[in-house]
Amino acid sequence: MYGDTLVMRKRAAQLREQGEDIRAMAEQLVTQSDEVAHESGWTGRAADAMRERVRDRAAHLREAAHAHDTAAASLEKHLAECDRLGESISDIERKVSSLVAEGHAPAGFSPPPSGHKDWLSVELPGL
């Protein structure tokens, strides 16, 4: 057909994994900034500002992770539709082949190439 859904499924999995990695990085940054302040006894406005800035950056990282999750979900939804349409194309192609073999196709009928989306619009008596 038009694309290799296996390759696209791998890409969706990569997006999910990257989202998980980014989310873990955000948590690690917050944890490390808190540990630095607590273990060293660093207090005051500068310490508070550093922790606040890290939390802000972590929030941005979490947003990026969520965007990766959303992209993966969208790609998976698209792939499910591709699979559904591919199955429909195969079904129609088999039915038409059977009808043609039984002599039920009109004279001059020219089938689309195998696997092509034009199979979705083929109209034959008995289809």
Image (spheres, rainbow, N blue to C red):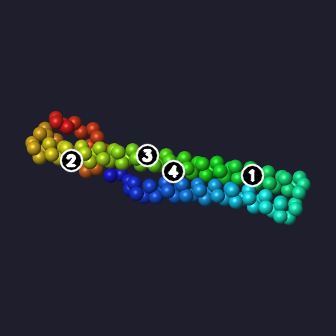
Of the two numbered discs 2 and 1 in the rendering, the one whose residue sits closer to the viewer: 1
What residue is shown with label 4?
72
**14 to 99, vertically: above or below:** below
| Residue that numbered label 2 is attached to | 94
Q: CA distance from mark 3 to mark 4?
A: 10 Å
Disc 4 or 2, which lies upstream in sequence? 4
Question: Could you say whether the residue bearing mark 3 is in a helix, strand or loop?
Answer: helix
Residue beneath label 1, please?
Answer: 55
| Amino acid carrying mark 2 in the image | Arg
Q: Which secondary structure, mark 2?
A: helix
**Circle 4: residue type:** Ala
Where is residue 26 shown, x and y percent of the image? 68, 56
* Residue type, mark 3 in image: His
First in sequence, mark 3 or 2: give its number: 3
| Label 3 – label 1 distance at C-alpha | 35 Å
Mark 2 nearby-residue class (10 Å; few <14, some 14–19, many ≥20): few
86, above or below 41, in the image: above
Dot 3 or dot 4: first in sequence order is 4
Mark 1 or mark 2, which is nearer the start of the sequence?
A: 1
Residue farthest to the bottom, as pictured: 40
In this view, which residue lies farthest toward the top? Answer: 125
Where disc 4 sits, the SS reads helix
At horizontal 13% and vertical 40% (from top left) the residue drawn is 105
Instruction: Please say if the residues under marks 4 and 2 sit with CB atoms less than 8 Å apart.
Output: no
Along the line of sight, which residue is nearer the eye, 24 or 3?
A: 24
Residue that mark 3 sits on: 78
Helix, strand or loop at mark 1:
helix
Q: Amino acid at mark 1?
A: Arg
In space, the residues marked 4 and 2 are separated at their CA atoms by 33 Å
